[in-house]
Amino acid sequence: MKKLEGTEVIEIIHYSRGDRQVKEDQVIVEFPVTIYLNGEEFITLLCSPKNLDYLVVGFLISEGFIQKKEDLKSLDYDEEKGQMHVELKQMSALKQKLYGKRTVTTGCGKGTIFYHVLDSMGTKKIEVESKFSPKGILQRSKELNQLSGLFKETGGVHFCGLCTEEAVVIFHEDIGRHNAVDKIVGEAFMSDVSLEDKMLITSGRITSEMLIKAGKINIPVVISRSAPTKLSVELAKDLNITLIGFARGERLNIYHGEERITL
């Protein structure tokens, strides 16, 4: 069995139609990376151990700690300790106090906390008028599904893509769908890729946190092969984001923002 990056090969017992077999299987690695901001322990993210620089930068952008290139002084990864040391030009004492030292899950929800105070910082109504066709959306969704080698082999990750009508610009996979989005945001930021003329396509369901992330970074169209939540639909209306679900095969559902879709 060829081992894929971000996985480990283990021995399992496989039962099928009454037959027992000892087989090898690949499982996704869940990896903790601890972020240090200006020398102080800040937060631990549980993620897939790939593209950690993009993940950390994207997370800090999504949470409002980085807004422009000048805000980020340095980024240094200690692989042996699993620590990412980030030096910022300036640090908001309020934001640092709100976070403190804590561990975030794989990015598939925030547990019993309905809304983190920081989620309301930096979101605004999107006025971008970019247009996309149903054909282009469905083609890119299909292409992303084909690109996701880790999902095909393990079924244990989400994938996410930043796309134009004609092409997938950035693609990432992670055990957490929000982590995959942050990796997209981080790479776009570090590579000077614009966001306001792109669509964000994800494999997982669309929750309120996903809409808040998109609103903060001015992405006008958010698409999933799965379902949105009721709160994400309400936020799409508040933030003027085009929200599309069940984009697979030859169909899709538009929950808000049809004006950006050319029929």
Image: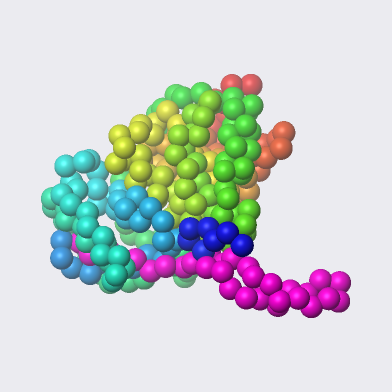
> Residue at image x 51%, y 29%?
167
Residue 138 spot, x, y in % from top left:
63, 33
Q: Is residue 183 left or right of residue 231?
A: left
Residue 63 seen anywhere in this rendered image of the structure: no
Check the picture and name the quadrant holding the N terminus. bottom right
Residue pictured at 15% horizontal, 61% vertical = 38
Is 243 placed left or right of 126 in the picture?
right
* 250 over 9 or under it: above or below: above
| Magenta stretch contains residue 21 | yes
Closest to the observer, 143 or 106? 143
Q: Which residues are magenta?
A: 8-37
Q: Residue furthest left?
A: 89
> Is residue 53 left or right of 38 when viewed as pictured?
right
The quarter of the displayed image where residue 179 is located: bottom left
Q: Position of residue 260 (x, y in %)?
A: 53, 26
Above or below — where is 3 with respect to 237?
Answer: below
- Name the quadrant of the C terminus: top right
Q: Nearer the viewer, residue 71 or 238?
A: 71
The answer to whether one can see residue 45 in this image is: yes
Asked if the magenta segment contains residue 240, the reply would be no
User: In the image as oriented, which residue stretches furthest toward the right?
Assistant: 17
Res. 80 image quadrant: bottom left
